Amino acid sequence: MTQRDGNVLVLNAGSSSLKYQIVDPATGEHLVKGLIERIGHDNATITHEYDGEKTHREVTIADHAVALEQMTEVMSETGLALADAGVVAVGHRVVHGGRNFSDPVLVDERVLAEIKRLGTLAPLHNPANATGIEAAQRILPDHAHVAVFDTGFFATLPPAAYTYAIDAALAKEHALRRYGFHGTSHEYVSARVPELLGADPASLKQIVCHLGNGASMSAIDGGRAVETSMGVTPLEGLVMGTRGGDIDPGAVLHLNRVAGLGVDEIDTLLNRGSGILGMAGATDFRDLMERVEAGDETATLAFDVYVHRLVKYIGAYTSVLGGVDAVTFTAGVGENNAAVRAAVCERLAWLGVELGEAANEVRSDNPRVVSTPASKVAVCVVPTNEELAIAQHTVAVIDSAP
């Protein structure tokens, strides 16, 4: 019996949150899923789903170890105990793999230490990822733990795409290069598009737009990533929920020298106070769209900036690829916001893009083509499933281990 005969507990630990799913990597079905928020606070919450029923609780959760204990407790009380879920391994989402990790790996002391060290490149993510791994190892000490890196899919970027034009010795010493993020999502979605279109993956030129609270874009040629919008950190690139994406580095120096903001203040501004929130004060894209529809000028400008950046990147990536066969939208905004897709596609008419108005308005959990048969570029919507991708990588690592 291989490990593929069992299920995988997939964990995504944030600084104050923990997402979890138990996934069957063979079928893609999940047995349970949940989200624990506000870890470290008295008013933490657990939202747990099993067998079509949703359970919500408010509890006190001191740390990630307690969060996992609460997860196992709510599982037992709602009908499927962790011990009875057929879990054979634990897959962990880790945001930054640096230069050393391009493939998923079994977690040992050396790997965990390197994940922690890479916290200097991803201070909002890797420390929390490491904390989640340590907590899970205490709860499930006899299970294999596998780290799956957001940056891994972009290990194929050519040097011209990942190299920053700064002092070469300094860049090498401090590992400054384009890494890219949301790689698990870009990998999963780009693999589904050829199936959807009935196309040969080896000849397909794709652009994938992962549009959630965090947003990134990739150019994929024959299944290999050749460009991506995020850089050494997830700050670069598209406009996002609380991150502004591309900005003149001189503006950062100006904020320090003239506005008097310190490094930590600028870090907070760029990571948590920019993007849609910074421009329009909206913390949810749905709220922004309500204001746009009501004629709010501030919200409309924010929407226009968001779309402009998307269109600019699609144009650039079309040139990098030497043409494009498919543009695909995924993640929360990409999958659910027809207005964003329509606004982007309207400005891509020069590429021969022709959006099907009725198809674009359909809400569905299934992959679908929303362009017309006459469109020279296929426009697709493919719901992402990072948890399934992590589960499949996890069993592959375990099955290949000696």
Image (cartoon, rainbow, N blue to C red):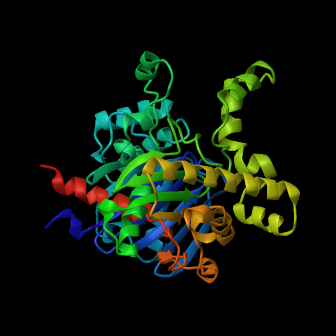
Q: Nearer the viewer, residue 263 or 154?
A: 154
Looking at the image, residue 40 sits to the left or right of residue 113; the answer is right
Determine the image quadrant of residue 75: bottom left
Q: Position of residue 221 (x, y in %)?
A: 37, 54
**Does 131 sit above or below residue 45?**
above
Q: Nearer the viewer, residue 224 or 388?
A: 224
**Does 43 sit above or below residue 30?**
above
The residue sitting at 71% across, 61% down in the picture is: 285
Q: Is residue 29 visible?
A: no
Looking at the image, residue 97 sits to the left or right of residue 340; the answer is left
Q: Position of residue 305 (x, y in %)?
A: 73, 51
Question: Which part of the image, by quadrant, shows the N terminus?
Answer: bottom left
Looking at the image, residue 17 sits to the left or right of residue 299; the answer is left
Q: Is residue 200 visible?
A: yes
The residue sitting at 45% across, 31% down in the picture is: 177
Determine the image quadrant of residue 15: top right
The residue sitting at 43% across, 51% down in the picture is: 321
How many dots with numbers? 0
Looking at the image, residue 201 sits to the left or right of residue 34; the answer is left
Q: Position of residue 286 (x, y in %)?
A: 72, 66
**Does 160 sit above or below residue 15?**
above
Q: Position of residue 250 (x, y in %)?
A: 69, 25
Q: Nearer the viewer, residue 363 or 167?
A: 167
The residue sitting at 30% across, 57% down in the picture is: 393
